Image: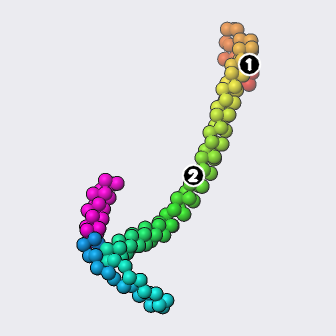
């Protein structure tokens, strides 16, 4: 993008400067309400007016992007809040996963400590009506 700006802007600047320095007559500027008269070379006046126009254009562009900059600031704040919430939730999920692993290990340890029923007890429990002890 910078290359394209230079490709277009450089010839325009060269044409303006050539036009300004070819017109080298004197010009009077009257600032009416203040009764001030300034006599200056036409080339200087052209360069100053072009620079003034450039600066006014940049200022207008800056003002027109003000709502976008405001929205960008708001989005950055929102993004920070969401990042903090995401970190909290990630931490909670990892804690819950650790709890699940611990509970599974405890369950395995409890099951390992229980006595295993013998084959005859398993057969008796097959025909029993009350399945609560099985």
Q: Residue at x 66, y 17 (%)?
A: 126
Task: Indicate which label's residue lies in the foreground, 2 or 1.
Answer: 2
Whether residue 114 sits left or right of residue 55 in the image: it is right
Residue 84 within the segment the image draws in magenta: no
Considering every residue shown, the one lying at the far top of the view is 119
Q: Which residue lies under the disc numbered 2?
A: 79
Q: Secondary structure at mark 2?
A: helix
In percent of width and height, residue 105 lies at: 68, 21
Within 10 Å of disc 2 (Cα), the crowding (few <14, some 14-19, many 20+) is few
Question: Main SS of the magenta segment?
Answer: helix
Quadrant containing the N terminus is: bottom left
89 left or right, relative to 37: right
At 63% across and 47% down in the image, what residue appears?
85
| Segment colored magenta | 1-19
Quadrant of the rendered image containing residue 108: top right
Residue 80 visible in the current orientation: yes
The residue at 62%/39% (across/down) is 90
Q: Secondary structure at mark 1?
A: helix
Q: Nearer the viewer, residue 64 or 98?
A: 64
Task: Say if residue 61 shows up in the picture.
Answer: no
Q: Position of residue 61 (x, y in %)?
A: 43, 68
Q: Earlier in the sequence, mark 2 or mark 1?
A: 2
Q: Position of residue 81 (x, y in %)?
A: 62, 51
Q: Is residue 96 above or below residue 126?
A: below
């Amino acid at each position: 993008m910078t290359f394209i700006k230079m490709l277009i802007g450089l010839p325009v600047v060269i044409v303006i400067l050539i036009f300004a320095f070819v017109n080298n007559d004197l010009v009077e500027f009257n600032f009416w309400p203040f009764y001030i008269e300034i006599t200056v070379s036409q080339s200087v006046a052209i360069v100053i007016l072009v620079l003034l126009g450039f600066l006014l254009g940049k200022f207008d562009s800056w003002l027109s992007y003000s709502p976008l900059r405001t929205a960008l600031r708001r989005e950055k704040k929102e993004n920070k809040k969401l990042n903090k919430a995401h970190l909290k939730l990630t931490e909670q999920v990892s804690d819950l996963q650790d709890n699940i692993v611990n509970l599974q290990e405890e369950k395995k340890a409890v099951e390992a400590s229980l006595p295993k029923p013998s084959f005859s007890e398993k057969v008796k429990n097959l025909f029993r009506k009350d399945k609560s002890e099985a």
